[in-house]
Amino acid sequence: MHRCKICDASTRSIEDSKKELAYYRCLSCGFVSLDDQYIINKVDEKSKYDQHNNSLQNEGYVKMFEDFIELSIEPYRKNIQSVLEFGSGPEPVLSKLLERRGFEVDIYDLYYAPKKVYEDKKYDLISATEVFEHLQKPLEVLALLVKHLNENSYIVLMTKFPPKDDKEFLAWWYRRDPTHISFFTPTSFNVMAEKVGLKVLKTINKNIVIFQKK
């Protein structure tokens, strides 16, 4: 039986017969993951990312991040100076917007900024926007990020929470991206937080979660 990657509870399978894919939904925390055998290789994954048109010239993309900053970062601004943008993508728009507001920002991305600049540093805030849905081992990555947080500092994630109904999940546009393999519920984020020494401060708009280091 497949066990949940987040809480190790039992799961039920969700079959996509058209694309011949299988997912597992946790019966306890609700986390949904693609069966590992269907995860695409790194070459195809990067090729998919290369097609993204996300830049400072894309007004809709910039507005999304400006809204994200106002909702999830500005309320804690007095406690934040240093930031790591984890998973910055081909063009690190978020980091540039944060720098305009006076934050000190480092970037890391597996493909586009692979130097692990964070290794000997700690930050007041780590952001990971549209990153965790791509991760095969999200709990391990979250634990890594916690090691690079100052005390009482923050991790802010953006990723869409999945529909609870299996049929709605299969029809959901967000999961159709072949690089999207992990889908989190507020409950699964609470479990993750407890395991790695964080607490969930709040969730926003079914796609943002704010953690604070205990």
Image (cartoon, rainbow, N blue to C red):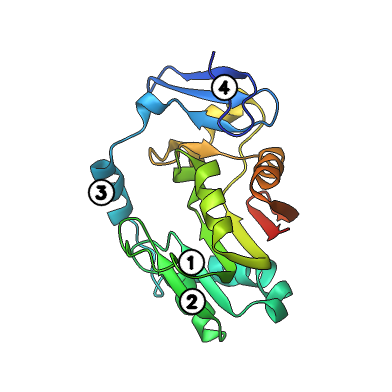
Residue at figure coordinates x 48%, y 76% from the top left? 105
Contact (CB < 8 A) between labels 1 and 2? Answer: yes
> Three-letter amino acid code at disc 2?
Val
Residue at figure coordinates x 54%, y 57% from the top left? 145
From mark 2 to mark 3, how far is it between C-alphas? 27 Å
Mark 4 = which residue? Answer: 3
Query: At which x and y percent is residue 127?
Result: 55, 63
Q: Quadrant of residue 152?
A: bottom right
Q: Residues within 10 Å of mark 2 (few under 14, many from 20)?
A: some
Tell me which label, 2 or 3, sits earlier in the chain.
3
User: Is residue 151 or residue 90 the one in the foreground?
Assistant: 151
From mark 1 to mark 2, how far is it between C-alphas? 7 Å
Residue at figure coordinates x 68%, y 47% from the top left? 193
Tell me which label, 4 or 1, sits earlier in the chain.
4
Mark 1 = which residue? Answer: 85
> Three-letter amino acid code at disc 3?
Ser
**Vertical placement of residue 111 versus 77, above or below:** above
Contact (CB < 8 A) between labels 2 and 3? Answer: no
Tell me which label, 2 or 4, sits earlier in the chain.
4
Mark 3 = which residue? Answer: 47
Residue at figure coordinates x 71%, y 73% from the top left? 76
Mark 2 = which residue? Answer: 105
From mark 2 to mark 4, how far is it between C-alphas? 37 Å
Q: Secondary structure at mark 4?
A: loop
Q: Nearer the viewer, mark 1 or mark 3?
A: 1
Q: Residues within 10 Å of mark 1 (few under 14, many from 20)?
A: many
Tell me which label, 1 or 2, sits earlier in the chain.
1
Q: Is residue 59 visible?
A: no
Query: At which x and y percent is residue 163?
Result: 64, 34
